[in-house]
Amino acid sequence: MDVLIFQGSPRAGGNCSILASWVKMTTEEHNKTFRVIYPHDLNIKSCIGCYQCYNTGTCTFDDDMTEIIDIIRHASVLVICSPVYTNSVPGGLKLLIDRCQAYHAELTITGHGGQKKKGLILSVAGRKGSSHFTCVTGVVIAFLGDLGFIPSGEILIDGMDEIQDIRHIPGLFERVRAIVQGCLN
Ligand SMILES: Cc1cc2nc3c(=O)[nH]c(=O)nc-3n(C[C@H](O)[C@H](O)[C@H](O)COP(=O)(O)O)c2cc1C
């Protein structure tokens, strides 16, 4: 699979859903394959920090993360679409991110962690100003790096409390398309 999208907002039809649909559209235009994962719809237990993964390369739990890690393993580009929730990523996405520690452990144990895959960050915030994204980018850049994806671009869209719908922002679709194309070429 070429492009894996984590759509981190629980709001169906919200701004991150629109961003994810633009990524999908661009991917299809290039005849590449994609998959969208909605963490809030999944059964993902919270990481309990048992560190079994660092001894065996596998997680204590066998829930929806087993399949997600397999999907990540085969993705060439990983796109994280996330709203800012209390200066960070929403809880469902954070559960998924923390549970990917098992995949990081697997890469570390097997020595396969040096892959050069590409990752993108697309984020929206209600308030105005770039400072609201500091935690989101910090979390997501660390996450991408742990899994062998090089952070290869970001689009951070602030002021959504006022604008409401990202489709009202001139040129934004073209910016998203360009950043995705940059990863596909
Ligand atoms: C629980 C919650 C917490 C939020 N926290 C912040 C915040 O800390 N800073 C901010 O700028 N916007 C915050 N927002 C606003 C969202 O980032 C904004 O509405 C965004 O457009 C939602 O994305 P979506 O349309 O993809 O769901 C919060 C929204 C919710 C529901």
Image (cartoon, rainbow, N blue to C red):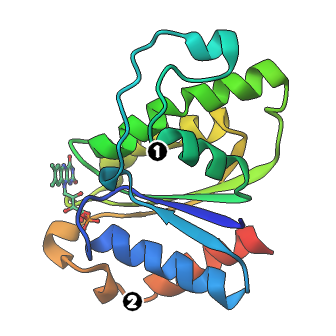
Disc number for residue 113? none
Q: Residue 86 falls in which quadrant of the image?
A: top left
Q: CA distance from mark 2 to mark 1?
A: 24 Å
Ligand 1 within 8 Å, label 2 CB = no
Q: Residue at x 49, y 66 (%)?
A: 36
> Label 1, on which residue?
137
Q: Quadrant of ligand 1?
A: bottom left
Closer-to-camera residue (144/40): 40
> Label 2, on which residue?
170
Evaluate whether residue 89 shows in this view.
Answer: no
Is 52 rendered above or below residue 149?
above
Amino acid type, residue under disc 2 in the picture = Pro
Cβ–Cβ below 8 Å for labels 2 and 1?
no
Is 34 rendered above or below residue 48?
below
Is 13 rendered above or below residue 9?
below
Q: Secondary structure at mark 1?
A: helix
- Left or right, 171 with respect to 157, comes to right
